[in-house]
C-alpha cells in the first residue's frame, strides 16, 4: 500500500479514536461520579496530542510525495528535452546533406549545360566539314570516272573483265602468301612456345576443371524468414565477421528471399561452413562464441566424414588399405569435380576399368586397381602445392608411404607428362580417357552428345572446299577431307586454321578439339 494512503488512514484512525475516547469518558463522567475529573481531562489531552501528531505526520508525508512527483516530472521533462535536441540535430544534419546534394546537382547541371554548348558547336563544325567533304568526294568521283573511262579506252577491257582479272590475280597472290606466312609463323611458335603453352594450359585446366565457376564455388543455405538475415549479420556485422573468420568462407547476404549464399574455392571448407550455418539457424543462438563452437564441432564432423568416404572408396576398389593420410586425400576428392564429374567416383571407376583390362592381359589386377584409384589423388591438394596434379599426386603418394614404382609412375605419367615405359601407366591413361570421355560421364546426355558432334561436323562442312568431316575421339578430334580440285596443299593449312577459329567462335565444348585437314589425290583405273 502507498505510504501517503497509509498515513491518511492512521490520521483518520487517530481522530476516530480520540473522538471515541472523549465520548466514552464523557458518558462515564455523567454516569459514574466516582471517576476523577483529572483523569478524564488527561485522557482527552493525550488523545488530542495523538491526533495532532498524526495530522502533522500525514501532512509531512503528503508534502514528501508531492516533492518526489515533481522531481520525477522534472527528470522526465529533461529526458524529453534531450531527445528533442538529438532529433533537432539529426534534422539539421539532414538539411546540411540535402543542401550539399543540391549544390552538387547544381554544379553537375552547369557542367552538363556547358558540355551541351560545346557539343552543339562541335556538331555544327562537323556538319560544315561533312558538307565540304561531300563536295570534294563528288569532285573526286567525277575525276575517277573520267580516268576510268580513259583507262578502258587505252586497255580495251571492260570494267567487269578488268575487275575479274585483278581479283583472280590478287586471290592467287594472297592465298600463297597467307599459306606461307601461316606456315612460317606456326613453325616459329611451335619451336619457342609449344612446350610452355601446353604446360600452362594443362595446369590451368587441371586446377579449375569446370564450365561454370558459380556451380562449384557457392552453396545456398535456406533460412526460415528474412528476419534471420539480421541475426546472421549481427549488431554492426559482428556475427557474420566472426563466422567468416572461423570458417574461412565468404557469406553473401543479399536481397534474394529465403536464402544465404556461402562462397569459397575450397569445397570442403564451403560444405563445412554450410552445415555449420544450418546448425546455427536451427539452434537460434547466433553470437560469436556459439559460432566458434559450432564451426569447430562441424569441422571435426567433416574430418570424420572425409575419412569415411576415403575408406569406402578403398574398400570398393579392393586395393588394400593405404596409409591413413592417403585415405584422407581420397576422401577429399568426394568434394572435387572435373567438368561436373565427381573425381572420387571417377577414380573408383578408373580402378575397376584398370583391373578388368589387367586381368585380360594377364597382369596383376589388384596393383592395376591401386594405380587407377590413386591416379588423381593430386587433385585433392593441387590448390595448395605448385605443379599439375600428376606431379603433386606422385609427390604426396611418395611422402605418405607409397613405395610401388608402378603406382608412382602411373600417377605422374597418366597424362603423358613423362616418357611412358610402364604397362600400368598405359592402362591408367586408357581407363582415364574411357571414364572421362564416354557419353554421359560428365553430365552430358546422349542427345546433347550426339548434337554436339553433329554441330562440330556441320561447322567444317560449311566450308565450300570441304567434302566430308568426321568427329572422332568423342568429339576431341575432327578429321576433314578437302576437295583436291578446289584446294592446293597451301590452301589446306589455311582451311584448317579457319575451321579451328570457326569452332572456337560458334561452339561450346570442354577441353580442346584437334582439327586435321586431309587433301589426297587418288587415281583409279581398271586393268582388263
Image (spheres, rainbow, N blue to C red):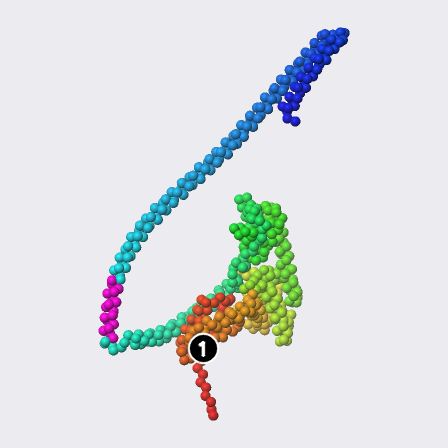
Is 149 within the magenta? yes
Instruction: Where is residue 366? Give x, y as percent.
Output: 64, 70
Residue 12 % position (x, y): 66, 19
Residue 4 shown in magenta? no
Residue 395 visible here: no
Does the image show residue 334?
yes
Could you say where residue 470 lies in the image, as x and y percent from the top left? 49, 75
Quadrant position of the N terminus in the picture: top right
Residue at image position (40%, 72%) is 182
Q: Position of residue 153 (x, y in %)?
A: 23, 76
Q: Secondary structure at mark 1?
A: strand
Query: 100 or 3, which lies in front?
Result: 3
Say which of 368 and 252 sits in front: 252
**Left or right relative to 99: residue 34:** right
| Residue in view at x 64 percent, y 64 percent | 314
Residues in magenta, as a range: 135-152
Question: Nearest the camera: 18 or 238?
Answer: 18
Residue at screen point 53% across, 71% down? 450
In the rendered image, which residue does mark 1 sit on?
467
Q: Nearer the viewer, residue 450 or 435?
A: 450
Image side of residue 58 versus residue 37, left or right? left
Q: Is residue 139 above or below residue 85?
A: below
Left or right side of 69 for 520 = left
Amino acid at each position: 500500500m502507498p505510504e501517503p494512503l497509509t498515513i491518511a488512514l492512521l490520521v483518520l484512525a487517530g481522530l476516530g479514536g480520540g473522538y471515541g475516547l472523549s465520548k466514552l469518558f464523557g458518558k462515564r463522567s455523567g454516569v459514574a461520579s466516582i471517576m476523577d475529573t483529572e483523569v478524564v481531562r488527561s485522557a482527552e489531552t493525550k488523545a488530542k496530542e495523538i491526533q495532532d501528531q498524526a495530522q502533522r505526520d500525514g501532512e509531512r508525508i503528503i508534502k514528501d510525495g508531492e516533492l518526489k512527483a515533481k522531481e520525477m516530472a522534472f527528470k522526465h521533462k529533461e529526458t524529453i528535452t534531450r531527445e528533442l535536441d538529438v532529433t533537432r540535430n539529426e534534422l539539421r544534419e539532414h538539411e546540411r546533406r540535402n543542401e550539399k546534394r543540391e549544390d552538387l546537382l547544381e554544379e553537375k547541371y552547369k557542367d552538363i549545360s556547358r558540355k551541351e554548348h560545346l557539343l552543339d558547336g562541335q556538331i555544327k563544325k562537323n556538319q560544315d566539314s561533312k558538307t565540304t567533304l561531300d563536295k570534294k568526294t563528288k569532285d573526286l568521283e567525277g575525276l575517277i570516272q573520267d580516268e576510268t573511262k580513259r583507262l578502258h579506252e587505252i586497255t580495251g577491257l571492260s570494267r567487269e573483265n578488268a575487275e575479274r582479272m585483278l581479283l583472280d590475280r590478287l586471290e592467287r597472290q594472297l592465298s600463297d602468301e597467307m599459306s606461307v606466312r601461316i606456315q612460317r609463323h606456326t613453325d616459329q611458335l611451335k619451336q619457342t612456345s609449344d612446350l610452355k603453352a601446353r604446360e600452362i594450359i594443362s595446369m590451368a585446366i587441371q586446377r579449375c576443371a569446370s564450365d561454370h565457376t558459380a556451380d562449384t564455388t557457392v552453396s545456398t543455405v535456406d533460412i526460415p524468414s528474412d528476419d534471420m538475415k539480421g541475426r546472421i549479420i549481427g549488431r554492426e556485422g559482428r556475427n557474420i565477421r566472426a563466422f567468416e573468420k572461423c570458417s574461412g568462407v565468404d557469406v553473401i547476404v543479399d536481397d534474394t528471399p529465403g536464402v544465404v549464399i556461402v562462397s569459397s574455392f575450397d569445397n570442403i571448407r564451403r560444405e563445412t561452413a554450410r552445415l555449420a550455418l544450418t546448425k546455427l539457424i536451427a539452434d537460434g543462438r547466433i553470437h560469436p562464441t556459439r559460432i566458434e563452437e559450432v564451426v569447430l564441432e562441424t569441422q571435426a564432423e567433416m574430418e570424420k566424414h572425409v575419412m569415411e568416404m576415403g575408406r569406402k572408396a578403398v574398400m570398393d576398389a579392393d586395393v588394400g588399405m593405404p596409409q591413413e593420410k592417403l585415405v584422407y586425400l581420397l576422401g577429399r576428392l568426394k568434394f572435387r569435380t572435373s567438368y561436373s564429374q565427381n573425381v572420387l567416383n571417377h577414380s573408383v571407376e578408373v580402378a575397376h576399368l584398370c583391373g578388368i583390362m589387367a586381368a585380360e592381359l594377364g597382369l596383376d589386377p589388384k596393383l592395376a586397381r591401386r594405380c587407377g584409384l590413386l591416379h588423381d589423388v593430386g587433385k585433392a591438394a593441387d590448390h595448395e602445392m605448385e605443379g599439375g596434379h600428376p606431379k603433386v599426386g606422385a609427390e604426396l603418394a611418395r611422402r605418405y608411404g607409397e613405395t610401388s614404382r608402378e603406382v608412382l609412375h602411373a600417377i605422374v605419367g597418366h597424362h603423358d607428362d613423362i616418357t611412358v615405359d610402364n604397362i600400368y601407366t598405359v592402362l591408367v591413361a586408357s581407363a582415364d580417357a574411357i571414364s572421362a570421355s564416354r557419353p554421359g560421364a560428365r553430365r552430358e546426355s546422349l542427345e546433347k552428345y550426339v548434337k554436339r558432334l553433329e554441330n562440330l561436323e556441320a561447322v567444317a562442312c560449311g566450308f565450300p572446299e570441304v567434302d566430308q568431316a568426321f568427329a572422332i575421339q568423342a568429339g576431341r578430334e575432327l578429321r576433314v577431307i578437302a576437295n583436291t580440285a578446289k584446294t592446293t596443299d597451301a590452301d589446306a593449312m589455311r582451311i584448317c586454321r579457319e575451321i579451328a577459329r570457326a569452332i572456337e567462335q560458334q561452339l561450346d565444348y570442354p577441353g580442346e578439339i584437334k582439327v586435321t585437314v586431309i587433301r589426297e589425290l587418288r587415281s583409279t583405273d581398271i586393268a582388263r
